[in-house]
Image: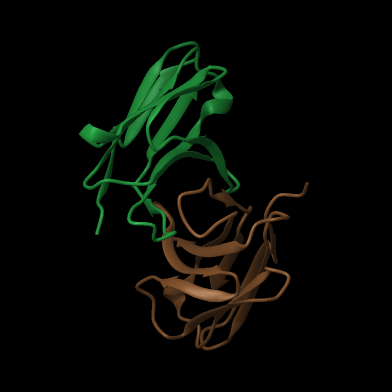
Amino acid sequence: GIQVEQSPPDLILQEGANSTLRCNFSDSVNNLQWFHQNPWGQLINLFYIPSGTKQNGRLSATTVATERYSLLYISSSQTTDSGVYFCAVEGGNTGKLIFGQGTTLQVKP
Amino acid sequence: DAGVTQSPTHLIKTRGQHVTLRCSPISGHKSVSWYQQVLGQGPQFIFQYYEKEERGRGNFPDRFSARQFPNYSSELNVNALLLGDSALYLCASTRGDSGNTIYFGEGSWLTVV
């Protein structure tokens, strides 16, 4: 099956700093999503981005499908950005998301 | 429109008991999937239902079962609970069966003692 690797596993930032999170996947995919999991466990949908670039406020994401990676950019980080960021992919029209292990982000005031 | 709703939000069960978790998808969505997330890991796929039929099953024992109703809501059932079943159970809904944005509910926290 498809393997998903995220890096770094942990990241500590000072408020206002920028960061880049990376997601590598081992095969072609027809769905790639980035999620933010809040402290209560809910997975918040950030981007649906199987290819190309999208921006939403301070967040942006780029997926290079041919090279099998995706990047999530967080600019001017805030303490509320803290939490776990997951990349998840779906391959082969399975309807099944395969998640990476996540990046745990802590933003300090 | 309401998002994906799950119930109950928290529950505690004893080993050997049975549990039923419920999920209502976003209006207009016909596919519901279930995921298990244990502490420190990413969610793991359990089941997908589309148009009331099982479309996919993850690597979980037969103690886990699910179904989807005509109104597209779903139930996840787990029999003979083990301590290792303690986890966050997440329901997701999507419009079609694949290649669409997938939205998650707030989850049901299950503790088995």
Residue B3 visible within the image? yes
Residue B86 position in % (x across, y down) = 49, 69
Q: Position of residue A94 (x, y in %)?
A: 39, 61
> What residue appears at the point 55 percent right and 78 percent down from the top-left corner?
B66
x, y (%) of residue B92?
A: 57, 57
Residue A108 appears anywhere in the view: no
Quadrant in the rendering for residue A6: top left
Q: Give the residue at the far right of this rendering.
A: B1
Q: Chain B is shown in which shade?
A: brown
* Depth order, front residue of A94/A75: A94
Depth check, front residue: B97 or B1: B97
**Is A67 on the left or on the right of A56, as rendered?**
left
A49 shown above or below A107: below
x and y, in percent, of residue A77 in the image: 50, 17
Quadrant of the drawing holding the N terminus of chain A: bottom left
Image colouring: by chain
Q: Residue at x 33, y 53 (%)?
A: A91
Name which residue lies at 51% across and 84% down.
B15
Judge whether A47 appears above or below A91 on screen: above
Rendering colour (chain A): green
| Residue in front for this viewpoint, B23 or B29 | B29
Looking at the rendered structure, the number of numbered marks drawn on it comes to: 0
Is A22 left, or right, of A33 in this rendering? Answer: left
B78 above or below A70?
Answer: below
